[in-house]
Image (cartoon, rainbow, N blue to C red):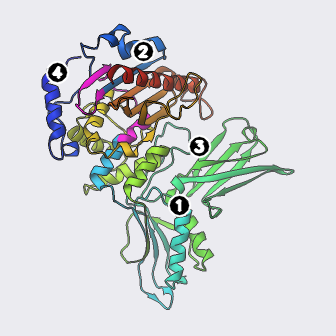
Amino acid sequence: MNDGVSRRRALGLLAAAMTAPGAAMAGAPAVSVRPHLRGGEIATRAVGGAKGVIARFGLPGEVVCAVADVRSGRPLEAVQDQDALPPASVAKILTTLYALDRLGPGYRFRTRLIGTGPVEGGVLKGDLVLAGGGDPTLDTNDLAALAAELKQKGLREVRGRFLVYDGALPYVHSIDETQHEHLGYSPAVSGIALNFNRVHFQWAQGAKGYAVAMDARSDRYRPEVAMARMRVVNRAVPIYTYADRKGIDDWTVASGALGKEGSRWLPVRRPAEYAGDVFRTMAAAYGITLKPADVTRNLPGGTVLVSHDSEPLHEILHDMLKYSNNLTAEMVGMTASASSGQRPENLRDSAAAMNGWAAANLGMRHTRMVDHSGLGDASRMTAGDLVTALVQVRRTGTLRPLLKPFPMRDAKGRVVKKHPIKVDAKTGTLNFVSGLGGFLTAPNGTELAFAIFASDPGKRARSKGAEGDIPKGARAWNRKAKQLQQRLIEHWSAAYS
């Protein structure tokens, strides 16, 4: 691999960038460094290095990787590190860095209840507005707390309308429109969310057929919802169907797919109606009767009666990386884009803003994301881009504490609790797509930044129309990809520590 710059000059430029004040986030290196195989690694060459590990493992499809020394910034080894593949949820690393830079680690999302008229004698002579502030973590407990606080303020009646404002962010029907409608990890996105925009579907078979319930449950409450309904239909396939019927999420499910009883979370396609439905129930529990919610994209003026603030952004991002929540990534990413003063029109628009930021600030010039979560398989990232960014931000100490420990396993697949190699990384998984990026610390303390992307685009394309959540062969392929990731980590630890 030759990008037109000598290795010595490239390493010098990276070292200069790393030692400059504020370099980690202020600007990209003058030259985007790409790891490549070092000529002096005789022992590594003897077994073919990472390329040999990949070839011997025989994972079908494409595999690319890169690794660099964190302390010196020195590129160590790479295989096709400029070939862009879908990063899946590894993309959330980039979203994390983008949000921290644009919003700051202490940023909090605020959800407000606004009165458009005066409150006299416990009566609001105007509209009550539930105003979303882009909080991806708002849940039923929070809405109940808002209703309780409203009651404590002495409000007992609302003369006007009940409005839900969701215009802080653009509305998106599904994070990835190619996904099946019933998959809870691809819900709708808007300026307000509740329970990660998922509704709980529960069923039980009785003498007269199935009893079903749709609710917005939390650990404290189980309010039933009117904006989502389910009918059990006597058929085998399709398993689920969805239709938007006058603002109601109208679902059917095949009876042949249900056992005697069970439950699952389904995506919400009408987040504002969902939040309004549940808040209306919570308010009624405190003696405040509201009219059915109307949705507005324009924020009415008025007085803030009560509000709820989220946890600080760094905690939200920690949980996003730990649980790989797609809705959190999209709402945080779009909020970061909107912080410039110009709200993005859609996910692609927001992702394009992030791509430009990543190129300018992290040297990620070959990354082309279409969303912030990595769920869309049209996104592309190179291993070289990610390693360049990881080396750069490691000096700030910001990212690694947010990453989840990656478990190392023995030959039988069992987790080794005291494995000598310590890995903190973000995984990424789609059907026939697997990624891993982060940091490893070798037994002697050497710290390396690495990225591994694998994809079998042919099998993924053929599996997209298959019924069910996971197509045939996907589990086995993804399991083998994860085994290959550990082989490469073990190889790098031995070769470069």
Mark 4 or 3, closer to the camera: 4
Secondary structure beneath dot 2 equals helix
Residue on which disc 1 sits: 139
Q: Amino acid at mark 4?
A: Arg
**Can you tell which mark lies on residue 7?**
4
Percent across and percent down for residue 115 are: 43, 78
Mark 4 or 1, closer to the camera: 4
- State how far apart marks 2 and 3 are (Cα): 39 Å
Residues at circles 1 and 2 in contact by the CB criterion of under 8 Å: no
Residue on which disc 3 sits: 182
Percent across and percent down for residue 172 are: 44, 49
Q: Amino acid at mark 2?
A: Val
Say whether residue 57 is left or right of residue 350: right
Mark 1 or 2, closer to the camera: 2
Residue on which disc 2 sits: 53
Secondary structure beneath dot 4 equals helix
The residue at the point 28 percent across, 45 percent down is: 353
Q: Quadrant of residue 364?
A: top left
Dot 4 crowding, Cα within 10 Å, few <14, some 14–19, many 20+: some
Dot 2 crowding, Cα within 10 Å, few <14, some 14–19, many 20+: some
